[in-house]
Each structure stands twice: as structure tokens, then as C-alpha cells.
Image (spheres, helix red, strand yellow):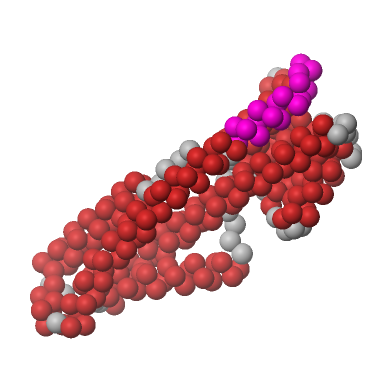
Amino acid sequence: MPAKKHKDHKNSMSSGKTQYGIYRFSLKEWIITIGAGIAAGITVVWICYSSWYALPITIPVIYAVVRMRRNTLCSERIRTLEVHFREFLSSLYSNLAAGYSLENSVKAAWKDMEKLYGADDPLVQELKQICREISIQIPVERLFYDFGIRSCSEDIRSFGEVLMIVKRTGGSMDQVLKTCRRTIGDRIDTRQEIETIIAAKRYEQRLMSLMPAGIILYLRLSFGSFMDCLYGNLTGILVMTAALAIYLTAFYLGTRMVRIEV
């Protein structure tokens, strides 16, 4: 029963708050993403089948484009959150060293982050909500624990869990912040080094992904009669479908190869 109560309380705290593992498009983003999906779908249909009867294929293409774009934006938001959270820990540590309580240190760090990144920054918005709930006597460690769960960031979640334990056991807050700041900083630095190293390979992978479509497009525009045998007949449909399946598999594997998690 106590576990159930804790779960219900956690759910009530998270109600209406941002779930960082779920990205919701704005209207502009929906228009751009769906437009890109439609363009990609029509291109696939024209290159591979050259028939209006194949237009239903655009539906899974649009779905794939939307999903990929959502995953990319979600990952970018979480990475930005982690980078800004490192700066928040530095400000929080400085305020604690100056003699502030943890609650007042969080409020002061929020103001520092607002000056640094602006009021629209996701972390600044989150800290604003945390400070508002601190003012109504909700324990700060529980707020950061809830934030860590919703953030989908291992670093922020670990900080929330450690903060909860430290507040219960009376451990050294300064040491916890120092360790968390160093750990998060090391992970971010390592990730940025890896990103720099594989940036060229990622560019090559994207370029190579466009090459097959580019070659077929060139042949269709320059030697249309040479490609006619692949359209309007069962054999051509099967060949192009097999080629499309191989291409999509290679694209997926190539994307996975240049995606390195730290």
C-alpha cells in the first residue's frame, strides 16, 4: 500500500508537466514535417514506381519522416537540457558555498539561468515551476526527483535520486553537487568529442544515402527509355520494391552506426 501511495503522489506531481521523452510539434513544425514527408513520399513513388496507384506508399513514408523528426527534436531537447543543467549545478554549488539554504540556492540559480538562457529556455521554465512549488512547501528533493524521471536524462535522474537520499540521511550536499557536476561535465565533454570525431562520417553517411536516389533520378531524366523496362510491369515492380527494401535497410543500419550514446 505505501508503494501505491507513493506512485499515486508521483503521478499527481507529474500531471500537466512536461514529459521530455515525448515531443509535441507546434503547428509550424507539423506543417514543415508533414510537407517534407509528402515530398519524400512522392519522390519515392515517382522514382520507384512512376504510377499514381503507388501513392498509398506515401503514408508510411510520412509516418517515418514524422517519427524520425520527432525523435531528433526530442533527443536535441534532452541534450540541451543536460548541458544547461550542468550550468545550473555550478550556480547552485556557488550559492550553497555562499551560505544560502538549498531552497534559496535553487531560486538564486534559477535567476542566474534566466539571465543566461532567457525565460523561454526549457530548464528555466522547469526551475520556475520548481521554485513556485517550493514556495508552497513541497520538498525540493521530491521536486528534483520528479523532474529527473520526466527528463529522460540519466544524469538528471541520478541527481534527483541522490538528492533524495542525501536529504533523508543528512549527507554532504556540497560533495554531492561537486560530484554530480563533474560527472555530468565529463559525460558532456566526452559526447562532444565523439560528435566532433564522427561529424565527417555522419555527413558521408547522409551523402551516401542520397546517392542511390540521385543515380536513379539522373538516369530517368537523362536516359528515360533505358529505365522504362522497370515501370508498368510486375517484374519491374518487384525489382524496385526489393531495391527500396535494401536501401531502407542500409539507411537504417547506417544511421544506427553513426549514433553513439554516452
The image quadrant that residue 234 belongs to is: bottom left
- Lateral position of residue 126 relative to residue 21, left or right: right
The image quadrant that residue 7 belongs to is: top right
Give the camera-side residue of 158 and 63: 158
Give the camera-side residue of 20 and 212: 212
Where residue 239 appears, as percent x and y from the top left, is: 14, 63
Where residue 62 appears, as percent x and y from the top left, is: 42, 64
| Total numbered labels placed on residues in the image | 0
Q: Is residue 253 above or below residue 173?
A: below
Query: Which residue is located at x 13 percent, y 72 percent?
Result: 230
- Lateral position of residue 92 relative to residue 159, left or right: right
Q: Is residue 193 above or below residue 180?
A: below
Quarter occupied by the N terminus: top right
Q: Answer whether residue 47 is magenta in the image.
A: no
* Residue 189 appears in view: yes
The image quadrant that residue 208 belongs to is: bottom left
Q: Which residues are magenta?
A: 167-184
Q: Main secondary structure of the magenta part?
A: helix
Give the camera-side residue of 234 and 163: 163
Query: Which residue is located at x 86 percent, y 34 percent?
Result: 98
Q: Is residue 249 above or below residue 239?
A: above
